[in-house]
């Protein structure tokens, strides 16, 4: 899928759309016939083929089964979803996708642990703040890309992931009670995965080194660890060994001050009861 178009590499979304069209034409089906034999609208399928829309992973899985194409479309979809991610996140996402160990400190519920509905609310709010309100399709593409990243939690072997959530992340509800309750339930469910450790840093822990930004530390199978620091409007990938070590030490201090995994699950369940009462 490395064809050149006007001297440039074909985008992931264009490659996916072209492959969808080729598979359909190979099967001798029109868009109308394909729509009739699947659960997808003809106009939606057309926009996938032209690269106007980015689907969810489940759509590609369905079409892979329909065409008998193995996981071809899913693999192309993984590349295509990067097209809707800002450049500064792409290098981070590539490292995240292959990390064997990942530690996170988050001032908000991270995308890796968000439900689809919660992600939609958050991303819609970001769109309004960036004066792109009303662009529902752009939001849906961002949601698909964000939720799609979560497949890494279920791959084999799954990476070892530790997430420390600041208590503030669990106190800032979204307007719809069910969306927030479902998000809390999802956090409890994810915490039960053998490869995931979830902790809460309570307000009572006081001030600490990571109060102003989110931090992700990642280790690959080989090579030195890297850090990704993200705040309001900025993101920086750090590979300087001394700086990464400094972030590692700050993370250790935050982890020592956090509730234990069991206490953290109890804390989230208590918030869930309050939400439902």
Image: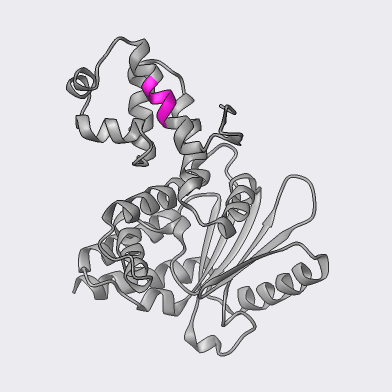
Color theme of the render: one colour
Q: Is residue 19 magenta?
A: yes
Quarter of the rendering containing residue 257? bottom right
Q: Is residue 129 magenta?
A: no
Q: Quadrant of the C terminus?
A: bottom left
The answer to whether residue 240 is left or right of residue 199 is: right
Residue 191 showing in the rendered view: no
Q: Residue at x 49, y 46 (%)?
A: 83
Q: Residue furthest right?
A: 242
The answer to whether residue 243 is left or right of residue 147 is: right
Q: Find residue 126 and report its horizontal and vertical position in percent.
A: 37, 68
The answer to whether residue 12 is left or right of residue 95 is: left
Q: Is residue 255 above or below residue 195?
A: below
Residue range (magenta): 17-21
Q: Nearer the viewer, residue 165 or 48?
A: 48
Q: Find residue 105 and report its horizontal and vertical position in percent.
A: 57, 70
Q: Find residue 142 and report its horizontal and vertical position in percent.
A: 39, 53
Q: Is residue 266 above or below residue 22?
A: below
Magenta stretch, main secondary structure, is helix
């Amino acid at each position: 899928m490395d064809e050149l178009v006007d001297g440039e590499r074909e985008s992931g979304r264009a490659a996916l759309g072209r492959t969808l069209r080729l598979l359909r034409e190979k099967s001798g089906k029109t868009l109308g016939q394909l729509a009739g034999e699947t659960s997808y609208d003809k106009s939606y399928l057309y926009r996938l083929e032209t690269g106007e829309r980015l689907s969810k992973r489940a759509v590609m899985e369905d079409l892979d089964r329909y065409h008998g194409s193995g996981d071809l479309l899913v693999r192309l979809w993984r590349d295509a979803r990067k097209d809707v991610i800002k450049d500064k996140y792409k290098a981070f996402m590539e490292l995240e996708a292959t990390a064997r160990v990942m530690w996170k400190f988050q001032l908000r519920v991270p995308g890796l642990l968000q439900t689809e509905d919660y992600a939609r609310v958050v991303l819609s709010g970001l769109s309004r703040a960036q004066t792109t309100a009303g662009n529902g399709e752009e939001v849906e593409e961002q949601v698909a890309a964000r939720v799609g990243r979560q497949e890494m939690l279920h791959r084999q072997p799954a990476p070892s992931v530790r997430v420390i959530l600041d208590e503030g992340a669990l106190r800032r509800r979204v307007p719809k009670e069910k969306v927030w309750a479902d998000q809390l339930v999802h956090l409890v469910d994810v915490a039960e995965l053998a490869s995931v450790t979830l902790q809460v840093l309570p307000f009572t822990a006081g001030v600490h080194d990571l109060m102003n930004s989110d931090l992700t530390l990642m280790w690959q199978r080989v090579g030195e660890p890297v850090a990704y620091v993200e705040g309001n409007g900025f993101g920086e990938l750090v590979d300087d060994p001394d700086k990464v070590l400094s972030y590692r030490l700050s993370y250790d201090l935050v982890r020592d001050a956090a509730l234990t995994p069991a206490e953290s699950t109890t804390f989230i369940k208590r918030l869930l009861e309050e939400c439902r009462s």
